[in-house]
Image: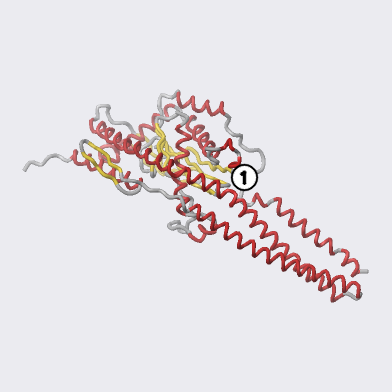
Amino acid sequence: MINQFKLNTFPLYIVLLLVLLTGCNTTSRSVNQPILVGPTEPEVKAEVRDKYVAQLQQSSYFLDVAVPTFEPGFPMTNDGKDIDYGKLDEEGIWPQLRRTEAKLFAVETKNALEKTAAFSSVRVVPNANTSADIFVLGRILNSTSEEAGMELTVVSAAGEVLGTKRFEHTVDENFFKDQRNAGKNPYQPLYDSGRDYVLRLLSQLAETKKKEIKDIALMRYARYYSPEAYSQYISTDVKRKSGQSYYEFSLNGLPPDDDLNLKRIKDLQAQEMLFVDRLQDNYDTFYAETNDAYRTWQEETLPEIIAYREAKFDRNVKAGLGIGLAVLAGILASNERNSGSSLGRGATTAGSILAGVGAAVAINDAFRSNSELKVQSAIIEEKGQAVDLTVSPTEMKFEDQIVELNGSASEQYLQWKQHLREMYELEQTPDVQL
């Protein structure tokens, strides 16, 4: 009777195993997505966004916004000095593609902000070592053509961190199948959310605060050229906010309006911004040349990413099923040894053989799925590495002098800043009578 009961429970083992595995399937999608429960922050409606824009446009002080190239978001070693290439491989990040995305994300964020016409200027810059009133610092959290995430930190020229927020977006698997989406960026909701966040933060600044930020930006720039003359107008302190340390700059005063040296520095600042404006042409060219290739990468790898995820889940299910059946085979074999009934022994033997065969098939199938995963990974890597960036030499004219700049955008920008400073120092050097 006992053995007959154990035999009758054989289908129950199978049912329970299948229920367990089926339950895994319902949560497979959430593994790579952030968990969110409870009420969510509502999206910024158009009329609210228009209110933010109107507040900025009606201000007496239009802000200059700099968007440095995003941090690629590479995993780093414990000391934070080097890239952890082991984790880089585990997370499926291809360095050249991610570095290209760091520029694309910055350009897209700049475009989203610029279209609002709420600022004096919005420029993409190689790094934060530039002159601006507001800096929108970005870091890529993830980008898989299916899922994209970024973190924005808004900082004023006074060094104050106005806010930090993370943004996530999942591209629908049918996005590219809809003809109405032709020419649209599948990540656009990500950039729109970032734009709305920046608008909200900056629209809350009082007029006196905006003027102070612009004055501090000018004094910091003047101090770069002549610290002995302008350091007295700026004080520096280290502050902490939300666990983040930052340098805060406060204004002690302003030089007189007829300061001729400051006027000359403003002229140099205009020359520096002229180069930054020309640099926008390079970024626009880079965007135009790269965007089609990048969109092709997104469109062709999206189904591969989905197939990869589904195949990975399928592999885990099959492996789990194989292990479960193997355990079941052991249980039935144990029942067979303890069975006193020839009928029970025959039934449990057949059950153990069936379960054993099922385990072998499932595990072997899982290994085949592993090979498929490698092929899909290779396809994604091949497409990811196809996107690259080149920067052409730039010629700048300054007071009848033509200066040729070479290297990356960051290197060219540094060369131009150094040239302007050399010109300033040369002008400040008194003539020596021989």
- The x, y position of residue 116, in whole percent, is 47, 29
Residue 372 position, x and y percent, is 61, 60
- Quadrant housing residue 131: top left
Compared with 250, 243 (above or below) is below
Q: Quadrant of residue 250 in the image?
A: top left
- Residue with the mark numbered 1: 173
User: Quick check: 10 above or below 27?
Assistant: below
Type of residue at label 1?
A: Glu
The residue lying furthest to the front in this view is 179
In the depicted structure, whether residue 91 falls above or below residue 339 = above
Residue 390 is situated, as x and y percent measured from the top left of the image, at: 38, 48
Q: Quadrant of residue 24?
A: bottom right
What residue do we see at 80% from left, 71% from top? 353
Horizontally, residue 388 falls left or right of residue 39, namely left
Q: Residue at x 45, y 32 (%)?
A: 114
| Towards the viewer: 46 or 293 | 293
